Each structure stands twice: as C-alpha cells, then as structure tokens.
Image (cartoon, helix red, strand yellow):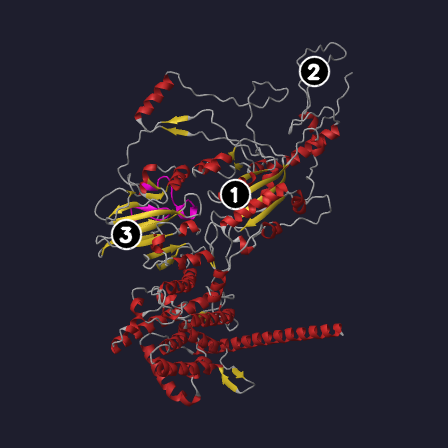
Amino acid sequence: MVRKQKQASILEFSFQQARTQAHVDLTEDEPIIPKITPEPILCPVCATTMEPWDMDFRIKHVEECLTMSTVKEEVPVKTEEVKIETFEEVKIETERLQNGTSDEVKEEVPERPPLPGKSSSSKKRKASLSAVQKDRLRYVNSKEEVPKRQRLRIELEESPTELLPSSRKTPIPDLKILTFWPDYDRKYEISMDAFSFKPHETITQYFLSHFHSDHYGGITKRWPRERTLGSKIIYCSTITGKLLAIKFKIDPEFIYPMDPDVRYKVYSYEGPEEAHPSQEKTPGIYTTPIDANHCPGAVIFLFESVNVRGESTYKLHCGDFRVCPKMVNHPALRPFHIELKLPLKLEKVYLDTTYMSPKYNFPKQELICSSVADMFSDLVSDDKLFGEWFGTQAQSRITDFLFRGAQKKKKKFLILVGTYVIGKEKLAIAISKKLQCPIYISNINSRGDKKDIIKAYGDAYLDSVITDDDLGNHPNAIIHLVPMKIVGQAQEMANYFNHNEYFKHFERCIGLRPTGWTFENHVTDDNFVDAEDEVPMLEAQGVSLVSLVSVLSLKPAYSYRHDVLRQNPPDKIKKGKIDSSTCKIYSLPYSEHLSFRELSYFVVFFNIGEVIPTVNAENDWTALMATSSLVLLLKIHYVNQLEEPTSLHAINVPFIQLIPRHAITHPWVFVTAIFAEISISLFLVSAAVLFAATNYIEKFWGPTEVLKFIVLVGSITNLTTVMIAIVSNIFREDVGGMDKPLGGGISYFFGFLVVIKQLIPEHHVILFHGLINFRVKHVPFMLLVTVSLWSLLSSRSLYPAVPSVVSFFVSYNYLRFYQTFSSDPLLPVTSVSGDQSNATVTSGDASDAFQLVDFFPRAIKAPVSVVVNLIYDVSVLLGIVTPFNDDAVEQSNLRAQKLSEQVSQANRLIANSVAERRRQVALQVIEDRVGLT
C-alpha cells in the first residue's frame, strides 16, 4: 500500500526538483522509486544557496528578499532606423547585403536558464509584470544595450514642392517680434522664441535663445516645412542646433548655427544674401550671440541694424540669462557702458524679469557651487563633521546578517543632482572637480537620449568624468544626474534609492534641489513645483525706493553649515548612533536667472532707451507692476548719465509716464501712468494710498472689482487730462508744456474718496478731541476746493485740479449708474461674491444717500441741485444713462442700510480688538512689575 503524501505548499512547489524519467511496473506490490540527483536549492530572487537552512528560515529569507528588492528588468531598446541619404550609399549597402558580406556582429546576450523540469526547447512565455513591479521599474536605471540588429530604411523621397499645412491658429504676439527700419517707409521683422504660433506672412527668420521648453515650445520635425521649402529658418547657437537635431530630428538644412562671440550678418537690405560671419557695416541686420550664463547653448542676441543711410540702431534680446562679469565686460557690450563719455545707446532691451521683486536677492551661482562642493569634501574627509550631521555608524538592514561574508564597505554618499532636459550641470561639475568622483547620467523618465544631449555640450571635463557604472569607482561618492522630480519629494528619492538597491553600496543618499526661488520660499515636498524652468516671481505691490536701495547695498552671503545642512537637521541621537533618515533633500538657491539685485545693476549699468519685460508679460496686471518697478531703475539710470547733478523729478520716461506730446503715440501710458509717478515722494504717497484703500475696499468688493475700478477710472481720467492739457497748451502757445510729465496716481485718489463716502455716508471724523469735526461725505468736496485753489494760485496750471475733478466725476458716475451688484438686500457687496442664484443683477447705486448733491455743503445744495438735475435729464434723453425706477431706489436704499450696518460692525470689532490687545499688554506689564518686587 502506497503512503499518502501530505499537501505541498506553494513554496515547496516552487522549489520542486527535476525528476528523471523511469519505468514503473504496476504488477509489483510496491512502486519502484527512481533515484533522484539532488540539485542546489537557490533563492529565486537573489540566487543564494538555501540548502543548509530549514524550511522556516527559507520562507523568511524569500519574504525579506521580495520586500527589499525589485525585479530589475532591462528596458527594451527600440530598433533604430538608419537613414541612408545618398544613392551611392544605398547601392553599396544593398550589394553588401546581397553578397552576404555583412559585418554585423551578433551580440550574445546571456539568457536565464530554464526552470527545472522544463525542456529548453519549450515555448517561452512572455513575462507579465504586476502593477507593483511596473511602478518600481519607473525608478530603475537600465543598462544601455547595443541593438542586435539594425533595420535599414532606404528613403528615396522627392523634395517637397509646396509647404505643409499648419494647424496653429494663434498669431505671433508683438512682444516676440523685433522690428527694424531699413528706411523711413520700410520695415523688416524677425521673431524671437516664437514657435507655437501660426506661420507669419512676412517673417522668414526665427531666432531661438536657448533649449528650454518655454522658449522652443511648438517645434516639431515638420515645423520648418510648414514655413519654408529648404532655406535656413531657425537661427540659434551651435549647441542648441545640435539639441534640436537630437530631440526633434530637425533636418540641419533648416538650422543656421552660430558660435558665441562672432558677429554675423543675417539679413541684407540691399538684396538676397545668405547669413555669414561679417565685420562690415553695409546696410542690413547683424547679430552677435553672447553666452547667457543660463544653460548650455543659451545666448543673448545683440542686434545691430544699419539702415540705407548708414545709421546704426541697437537692440538687445536677453531671453533667459544670469549676469556675470564676463558678460558685462564683453567687447560687444562695452561701447554701451554709461561710464564712457559718449556711449552708444541700446534702443530696446528685452529683459528677463523672472525675479522682478527685491524679495529674491539670492547669492551668486559660483558661491553656491563652491559652498556645496566644499560641504561634500568636508563631510568625506572629516569623520567628526559627518558624525555630527549623519551619525557615526553605517545603517544596517534586516537582511545584512545573511551576507556578512560577502558584504563590502559602503561608500558614504550617493549624490543626486536634479536637472531638467538641460541645465544645472554646473553644480554637478563643481562637486565632481572637488571630490574627483565620476558622474552617472540616469536614463529614467527619458527617451534614452540624455547622454547624447550631454555629449552635445562639448564640455571636455564633463565628457571625461561621465561613466556608465552607476556605482562608480570612487571610494566615497558618485554623482547621479536625475530628473528634478526625483529630488522634488522624499518618497520619490527613497524609491530611486531602494528600487535600484543602492542601499547595499551607499550609506547616505543626498538629493540636491537647485531652484533659485527656494532661497526665500523654503520649498518643501508639499509646495515643490516640477517645471522645466524656474517659476516667475513678481510682487504685486511693485518696488519702493527704500527696498531698491536696500537690495543694491546688500550682497547676500552663503555657507553650507548655516544654509544647507540646517535645512534637514539630524534626529535626536545618542552617541555612537546614527540618524534614522537615510535619504535627505537640500534645496539650493542655485538659479540660472539673474536676481533682482543683478537685474537692477544691469539696467543701471548700460545706456538703455527702453526696457521691455519678457516674463509674465502675457498677464496685463503683472506686466504693469513690472514696468512701474522698472521706472525707478530707469530714473536712476538717466541721472547717472548726466554730467551735472539733477533730481529724479527732472527725468522723463515717455513710454511709461503721462507726457502730452508722447501719450498719443504711446496709448498704453494711460494705464501705466496710474502706477508711475513723477517723483519719489509722490510715488511713495500713491503707493501708501493704494495699499490702504484697496485693503479696506477689497473686503466689500473683492479684488477683481477693485482692480477694474482702478484701471477704468484711472485710464479715463488720464485720457481726459491729456486732451485738456494739449488743448490748453495749444491755446496758450506753451510748447514746453507738451513735454512736462503729469502724475497718474491722482487719477484714483479722489475715486477712493467717493467709494468711502458710498460705504459710510453719514459717519463723522473727529480729530484732536473734537477740535475738528466733519462728515465723511464732505471730505471729497473739501479736498477738491483745496487742490483747485493750490493749482490755480500756487502752480498756476490746470494740474492737479483737472485730474482731481475728472477723477471725482468719473468715479461717481461709474458707481451711480454702471457698477453691477445684486438686488438682494442680504448681499450688499458687488456681484463678485456670495450666492447669486436667487438674486437679480442691477446696475448703479440709486440710494438716496448717494445723491451727488449730498457731497456739497448745505449752503450750496440748491444751485448745485438745479445743475445736476439738468445734466441728468439731458443724459437720459441722449440715452447715456438709464433712469431709476421706484423698485431700484428701494433696493438700493436697503442695500445701503445693510452695508452701513456691516461697516459699523466691522469698525466695532476692530476697536474691540485693539482695546483687548492694549488690555493684555497692560496686564503683562503689571505681572512683570509684581514679579520683580
């Protein structure tokens, strides 16, 4: 009788031994069991021999291997297609293949042995990975393979005879078009970083400043053939041209590569002429690419246009750049230095305003690189410093006791440097030079062309230290260039460290997150933004003179002990122990854009006619803030150019300020002048009024309505003021008055007074213990009279009387007849907030408390009422305003009453809060005194 076998476990089944074939005689009483040759029992994960261990220990070992490891699958290499260009090459290659003389070498790839008990000739199943394994493979560095076979694709295409159709509909914006004038009645245009728009009717030359997606965005392989049949159309640096060919497979026949520091003639005004290096001065457009100190291949373009009369004009397009002494002292830019007696003038400078705020005053790029390199050098050589921040013992894992015999000493650091497609390599090079360690290029999240991109830089040192070994041959460290996402979050970096099993070879994994805006923003895992370039930072309140002077005089310092290591301090550890955190991320203020301090000096250092912000310019509000901030820099710049000392008040900036002669040709100044005053004192006063008023009114209206009110009232007031000034100057034959700037801040000053009267119509203002007592509704009239008398008697001009009066009436009419709000009395604010589902939206404030005559004293109300009623009747007849009905008046009265109650309640809360704070301070003082006695 045969003994029953016990049920086999899944683990036993996975390790069952191969059985040899044998004949069994069923006639005998007991079966004949053939002799089995035992085979070694190996761990299916790490291939460790498990014969000496019992079953429980084998199970435990396999579970630990499955937990700590991942199946390293080789990423399949796509078969590359070799394109043979010429007919001769096609013929030779075809004959070679037909004659069987191919010298193709078949690479032998070791295959995994078949499972025990399976024939080697059996069909192989396609390996299927689980979701967990697929997720792990996203972090695994695969080895580069040479394809076993390359398929030849022979293309005998005819040259296209017509342009390919384009699906782009958006035209190129004016900001990305540079216009040159060969003659008075003729112009020529080129574009800069404009590849995501529809083909232009006249532009045939497209310049590319550098290889970042926010600048080359829109380029595809077919992009050139949508605009030309075979001529050079993309003008860029030599490195950028190589990157275009690698990344997008663009045919080099469409690219005109230019070496830095070489002057090229790119267009001739006298007839067709191919681009070429040139030092001549014949009519045409010349450009000199200058290293932008931004990313590999990035340049700024200095354009020179020589018209048919031999006159030269210059424009500088900066793209993205970081100012350095080499750039400022470049031979092509030296003639524009203001320190020269007769400097040349840059008519327009297109400026990188990524960090248009004094808040972003980060250290120099070289200081960051040297400090971080010194940090790793000191940590490697100084065991005491290493122990202070990371502990003194190597961290062990649960499986380390199984491999004690073969375990090697771990290296100290795996250094991960976050990079974009290109950029940030300078930081890795600085560390590598200091430690003399290699650099490994990770190929995760890439198409396998990352190494080709790095090789295209042509950097001799970088080429010499790049290695294919992700562990490296340095005894203490290796640098990995990884996507910025890996160092963006601690979990991402931990996955990279664990899934590649780097914990077996390195004690610590250090991630470096080099983004300039981390200097002030204290970036964490929660607020990190993964973008190919740094996020634009622009403050809404503009730049004050105090902050500007402070920034220009402050040179930020940087040290790795204070600014780097303290970001991620060690856990509280006892002597002889280690910090529990293996992976640490440090954010570095390494920026490839110029800081606000460098931006300020750049504007002041050169003889510039007009500065045009290129970052955030698509947002009207931020563009206005950028221009208003640059006004102060330009004024200081103009003062530095004058031989005789003068005041900022005497300097005019016609493309931003409100100057009658230039306002008609620069219509945008009606808006920009709102934020650009004619003197520093008025600028500070206007900024204070703007901040205080908007902060108060926003609570009742919302930010959108406040901005709409400022721009609408300000622009209409400035337009009216300029028209009156022009007529007045013509009538008085005052030619000089056409060039006098007019302040634009007063355009919204009286508008705010009208708004406050609407919010609190019957409130009283009491000053000096009742010595001065007047109603809020009379404040606008009192100030109007004061400003008008001072304007006529002191300055003897219509300014600032005219903008004051115009601002008052424009703002009143807008609030009285046109501002939209909900008719629901429970919603006293405008229609920008609250639940409007059951409310109807009406226009104007028809309340009795907001009548125009209420702004005037009782003594003159009667004659004013006659004039106001007459104007109102005429406006109704002309259809300018819509008369109010009884329902509108009733709803407006209810709204005004409710709004007044809200304002009173808010004021009481503020007063109570102030009183409570004072009481707490008094109690604290009493307690301190009692404690001392």
Q: Earlier in the sequence, mark 3 or mark 1?
A: 3
* Residue 447 visible (yes or no): no
Q: Toward the viewer: 593 or 542?
A: 593
Query: Which SS type dominates the magenta stretch?
Result: loop
The span picked out in magenta is 196-224
Is mark 1 in CB contact (under 8 Å) with mark 2?
Answer: no
Of the two numbered discs 2 and 3 in the rendering, the one whose residue sits closer to the viewer:
3
Task: Indicate whether 553 appears above or below 323.
Answer: below
- Residue under circle 3? 305
In which image quadrant can residue 922 be found? bottom right
- Residue under circle 1? 430
- Residue under circle 2? 37
Give the residue displayed 21% in from the left and 45% down from the top.
271
Under mark 2, the amino acid is: Thr
- Is 218 part of what is drawn in magenta? yes
Instruction: Locate the N terminus by quadrant.
Output: top right
Residue 634: x percent and y percent?
Answer: 39, 63
